[in-house]
Image (spheres, helix red, strand yellow):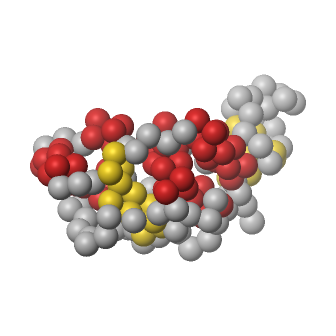
Amino acid sequence: MYVLDSSAFIHDFHTSEQTATIPLVREELTGESVYRYDAMEGSGMHIHIPNEDTTETVHRAARESGDADVLSETDVRLVSTAFELDATLVTDDYAMQNVAEKLSVDVEFIAQDGITEQRDWHFQCRGCGREFDEQKDRCPICGSELSRKNPT
């Protein structure tokens, strides 16, 4: 089974396998993509609502990897759906791929190259330059904002 992100509808992804998605994806779509969503739903695509325990598991994995601030609630619920259904997530979103990889969820990408490795991001203070393993609202030392930094 494939769980489809909005990029699957935008890029007209085709498969003979069973498909699933979440209602929030339709809200992200415009134009012909909406018609593709509706047609696939009418042809038997499963519309899934993940449970809150699974959603919290994905939020936790996103915080651990450093992707929490770049994932939308739609993204979190799509990864949760793929996790619950033991399905392959179809997305071009790198942060979603990174969190899915952390949770051992298979990913297929469409128009972009997929990630080559799973990353746990670090965060660096824009003011004093100190590095942290976890995202914080502000640097506890100088109060400046933190930015995501590629781990080396």
The extreme front residue here reads 44
Q: Is residue 1 above or below residue 21?
A: below
Tell whether 26 sits left or right of 77: left
Q: Position of residue 97 (x, y in %)?
A: 52, 60
Question: At 32% from the left edge and 51% from the top edge, which residue is drawn?
Answer: 46
Q: Quick one: quadrant of the C terminus?
A: bottom right
**Left/right of residue 149 with respect to residue 29 in the rendered view:** right
In the rendered image, residue 83, in percent from the top left (x then y), is placed at 55, 56
Residue 44 in the image: above or below residue 57: below
Instruction: State which quadrant residue 113 falls in.
Output: bottom left
Residue 10 place in picture, x, y as percent: 23, 55
**Horizontally, is 83 left or right of 92 in the view?**
right
Q: Nearer the viewer, residue 145 or 38?
A: 38
* Residue depicted at x 50% and y 42%: 50
Query: In the image shown, does 117 or 100 lie closer to the viewer?
Result: 100
Up/down of 29 relative to 122, above or below: above
In which image quadrant can residue 9 be found?
A: bottom left
Image position of 135 (left or right of 113):
right
The front one of 28 and 82 is 82
- Residue 148 shows up from this direction: no
Q: Quadrant of the N terminus?
A: bottom left
Q: Position of residue 71 (x, y in %)?
A: 52, 43
- x 54%, y 53%: residue: 84
Point 56% across, 63% down: residue: 105
Q: Is residue 75 above or below residue 91?
A: above
